[in-house]
Image (spheres, rainbow, N blue to C red):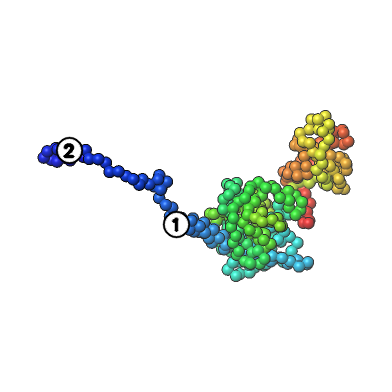
Amino acid sequence: MVLISTMSTLTLPPEPLPVVTDVPAAADATPAPREDTDAELLDAYSQVVTRAAELVGPSVVRIDARAQRGGGSGSGFVFTPDGFVLTNSHVVHGSNSLEVSLPDGRRFTASLVGDDAETDLAVIRIDATDLVAARLGDSQSIRPGQVAIAIGNPFGFQATVTAGVVSALGRSLRSRSGRLMDDVIQTDAALNPGNSGGPLVNSRGEVIGVNTAIIQGAQGICFAIAINTAKVIASRLIRDGLVRRSYVGIAGQTVPLPRRVVRFHRLQADSGIFVVQVEPGSPAERAAVVSGDVLIGFDGQPTAGIDDLLRLLTAERVGVAATVDLLRGTERISRSIVPTESPPRRQR
């Protein structure tokens, strides 16, 4: 080795390097993970769920609905400080009286503002002020795999919290009225009877959906109506008491079309709507649509099935003439039809 002195420099013969006989493997050089890492992660997850439940819990209510043929209970949540409550249509539809129980023990008689069987949403109101309103999120910003927390009153057990993830987005679900609901959220946060109408919440305590349905016999397959849909429907119910949609007055079913017919008429879809029945006095009857026709287009858009037609029958089309394309036998014909406002539907 070299020794350096401030006075002089002396060079000595090099010493032999020590022989190392036990070199640790490279993998052993990595620091061992802390034993409490998993506990810390679990604790962080618990804190997220706890915090979200604390934020939204004061807004979640129990709804008891009484009708001539008994009654039932469900959930809902306050979304304005002056007493508007969002819930499912099937929780309150057909009831004679409604009672809302708040988390603090107070009870109020509620009035029905409006319900929409087509999206299974309803708004009710209680005469109270300075309520804790749930914060509504943006269902367009959520992603599969993110934390989802459900709060409600399954089987009457109030303020029950379950947690899972957003399993999938953009599902379609058939409402009790028969209409297909689009943009439904699938989650594995456990839902049971009584959870209907309660909020599905993200990790920030924002409502991203309205819990609405489960698949009986399945495990972890539950559904919530996207909050962006609920915002639109709730605003229309508060304004008008109902949601306006257009109506043409046919009962139909989706049927496949013969390939030769599809090729001959150069159709965009290989199925259509077989008209089973035309309602008397309806726009369809006035347009000379008859049973046995196959509806293949509405206002320039193909109708491969009944759901395609229902999507096109929006409120904006009420009173506006449109062209319907039909197959009558093998002949293709067109008729002008003027949709009217859809009459109220009964829940099934």
Q: Secondary structure at mark 1?
A: loop
Q: Pointers 2 and 1 in contact (CB under 8 A)?
A: no
Q: Residues within 10 Å of mark 2 (few under 14, many from 20)?
A: few
Total number of numbered discs in the rendering = 2
Q: Which residue is mark 2?
A: 12
Return the disc, 2 or 1, that comes first in the chain's sequence: 2
Residue 4: % across, % down: 16, 40
Residue 10: % across, % down: 14, 38
Q: Is residue 308 left or right of residue 288?
A: left
Determine the residue positioned at 60% across, 60% down.
162
Q: Is residue 118 left or right of residue 294?
A: left
| Quarter holding residue 26 | top left
- Res. 45 visible in picture: yes
Determine the residue positioned at 81% across, 30% down.
263
Camera-nearest residue between 90 and 81: 90
Q: Secondary structure at mark 2?
A: loop
Residue 12: % across, % down: 17, 38
- Res. 55 visible in picture: no
Quadrant showing the N terminus: top left
Determine the residue positioned at 65% across, 51% down.
186
Identify the amino acid type marked 1. Glu
Q: Nearer the viewer, mark 2 or mark 1?
A: 2
Q: Residues within 10 Å of mark 1 (few under 14, many from 20)?
A: few
Residue 158: % across, % down: 62, 66
Camera-nearest residue between 70 and 189: 189
Determine the residue positioned at 67% across, 66% down.
155
How far apart marks 2 and 1 lie (CA) works out to 50 Å
Q: Which residue is mark 1?
A: 35
The label shown at residue 258 is none
Identify the amino acid type marked 2. Leu
Quadrant showing the C terminus: bottom right
